[in-house]
Amino acid sequence: MLFRSVIELQPDNALAYNNRAYNLALAGKQLERALEDVDKALELHGPDEAFLDTRGYLLYLLDRPLEALADLDSAIELLRRHRLRSGDGAGEIYYHRALVHQKLGNRDLSDADFRRAKQLGYQVPLPV
């Protein structure tokens, strides 16, 4: 509800589109609509590690792991370029990529990303 109001008042607010998309992803609801929202955020803002993470996670939830992996790889590349570390969502991005590698059967890569996420201080949230 809050994000809808923000988007109505500020239709060029990329962060509001991304945040609504990510909240829908976490809730496991309206995933196609959420994908449209994050695509709009990327259209408005351009490449951003948080937005690519959101889209990658949504694609994972939509059982499109190869597309998800491409977005999450791009998000991590942006993290590296910006030299971002813990406290900036980096651990969460590695965690999401670990889930994708797990789905693809890439056990070693999945384990490495799970370890990296933990090193960056990411803690898996409890189910809602």
Image (cartoon, rainbow, N blue to C red):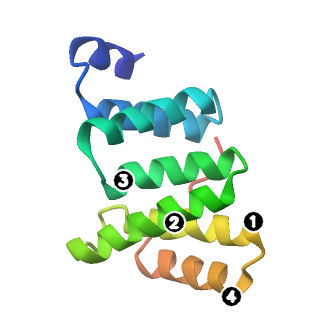
Report the residue marked by disc 4: 108
Q: Which residue is mark 2?
A: 123
Which amino acid type is shown beneath numbered disc 3?
Ala
On residue 103, the disc is 1
User: In the rendered structure, are the residues bearing label 3 and label 4 in contact, judged by CB atoms less than 8 Å apart?
Assistant: no
- Disc 1/disc 4 C-alpha distance (Å): 12 Å
Q: Secondary structure at mark 2?
A: loop
Q: Taking 91 as reference, is 49 above or below it?
A: above
The earlier-in-sequence mark between 1 and 4 is: 1
**Residue 10: % across, % down:** 21, 19
In the image, residue 111 above or below residue 127:
below
Q: Position of residue 127 (x, y in %)?
A: 66, 47
Question: Residue 47: percent from the left, percent from the top?
Answer: 30, 53
Q: Secondary structure at mark 1?
A: helix
Q: Position of residue 124 (x, y in %)?
A: 57, 62
Distance (Cα) linking label 3 and label 2:
17 Å
Residue that lies at the very extreme toward the right in this rendered image? 105
Of mark 3 and mark 2, the one earlier in the sequence is 3
Q: Residues within 10 Å of mark 4 (few under 14, many from 20)?
A: few
Question: Of tags 2 and 4, which is closer to the observer?
Answer: 4
Q: Quadrant of the N terminus?
A: top left
For the point 53% across and 54% down, the residue is 56
Mark 3 surroundings within 10 Å by alpha-carbon count, few (fewer than 14), some (14 through 19), many (20 or more):
many
- Do the residues under discs 3 and 2 have CB atoms within 8 angstroms? no
| Residue lying at 69% horizontally and 44% vertically, measured from the top left | 62
Q: Does 105 sit above or below residue 41? A: below
Q: Amino acid at mark 4?
A: Asp
